[in-house]
Amino acid sequence: MSATGLQRILVTGGAGFIGSSLIPELLNRGNHVTVADHLSVGKKQNVEPFLSKDNFDFIELDLIDGNTLKDVVKKCKLVFHLAGNSIVKTGYSNSEIDFFNNIVATRNLLENMRTSDGCKKIIFTSTSAIYGEAQILPTPEDYGPLKPISMYGASKLACESLISGYAGTFGIEAVIFRLANVVGPSNKHGVIFDFFNKLAQSDGKYLEILGNGTQKKSYIYIDDCVNALAKIGLRPFDSGLEIFNVGTDDQIDTNSIAQIIIAEMGLQTEIRYASQQNDGRGWVGDIKNMLLSTEKLKKIGWKINYSSNESVSLTTKKMIENKYNTIKKFDVKSSPHSLVL
């Protein structure tokens, strides 16, 4: 259904983890939200709480389908572009997925925005992976040269370049957010989710860590991420293109994440290590050390509420409280090694 008199916002990939967390914030600000998602990663159940609202629409749509996309874009004023492959490791086994789901999809979206009458602003979620193995930590937005080491990072950088080109050539306004690792209880991929799955599979007896466990990265809680996207992305600005890092002021290593999860679950778990890499990485394209500078974002009023450690701990606690609402569940109230399947 539609509503009149409200700002119309398109959220691509809105049925995913970040997108579905962003929707309530956009609706609460009095906007009309249309979610377009082809449900390869996102789940329709993530947007079901909003389907009955007058100011919300859902469309199952692949951004590769230019004709259907054109009809959606022309009804909106701005786009939160969150759609695309979000799993770094996938690009090693399938080199096409990042090209089509990130680069081609973004180009199709921008082209439809260019030919639309009123949809001329895009907020894009990029990634810290575009920096590659940065030699300056914390890494500022103007760091260079940018040398991503994964197909995922390369494709996101290509998307940024396309957005910059459309901004400079066709007057598209754009805000690019380079995100650290975003965590939260409803995230269905990433290190915390993987560790819960592995603990379930081993009945809590052992946990396999990819790499040597010393990889240090920044982990931002979903609420802090959403606050940045909505508060900063929706504000008026003078420049045609702005770029912001979004992350925490600290790092946490993979070994510490494992210990937090094991401790919160009350387990006595053996740690095992597995990697085909010789330098401690977990996989090809794994960045060993990542920390973003967020000073630019802070100067215009954004603040972080949770450190990396707190973000991991809070996510873990909420997953346990929710009895890990996925395929397998730990019953931590009975035996530390008891599983409810």
Image: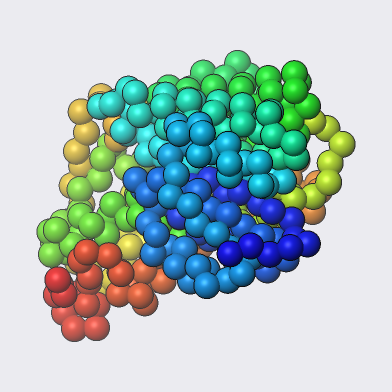
| Residue 69 left/right relative to 340 | right
How far from the left and from the top, in percent, is residue 30?
A: 73, 66
Residue 163 lies in quadrant: top right
Q: At 39% from the left edge and 64% from the top edge, which residue is drawn?
A: 45
Q: Tell me: residue 316, above or below residue 43.
A: below
Q: Pick whichever, 150 or 231, lies toward us.
A: 231
Residue lying furthest bottom? 334
Image quadrant occupied by the C terminus: bottom left
Q: How many marks?
A: 0
| Position of residue 230 measured from the top left corner of the image (x, y, whole percent) | 68, 54
Q: Residue at x 49, y 26 (%)?
A: 103
Q: Which of these two is toward me, 291 or 99? A: 99
Quadrant, the N terminus: bottom right
Residue closer to the observer: 304 or 106: 106
| For residue 266, above or below residue 102 | below
Q: Is residue 187 above or below residue 314?
A: above
* Residue 266 rendering spot, x and y as whole percentages: 26, 73
Residue 259 quadrant: bottom left
Residue 221 shows up from this direction: no
Q: Residue at x 74, y 50 (%)?
A: 234
Please report the residue visible at 74 percent of the width from the left and 56 percent of the height from the top: 7
The answer to which quarter of the image holds residue 329 is bottom left
Q: In the rendering, at what x and y percent does residue 295 appear? A: 73, 42
- Between 70 and 173, the residue placed more toward the observer is 70
From the viewer's perspective, tell me whether residue 43 is left or right of residue 267: right
Please tell me whether residue 275 is drawn above or below residue 150 in the rendered image.
below
Could you tell me if residue 166 is visible in this image?
yes
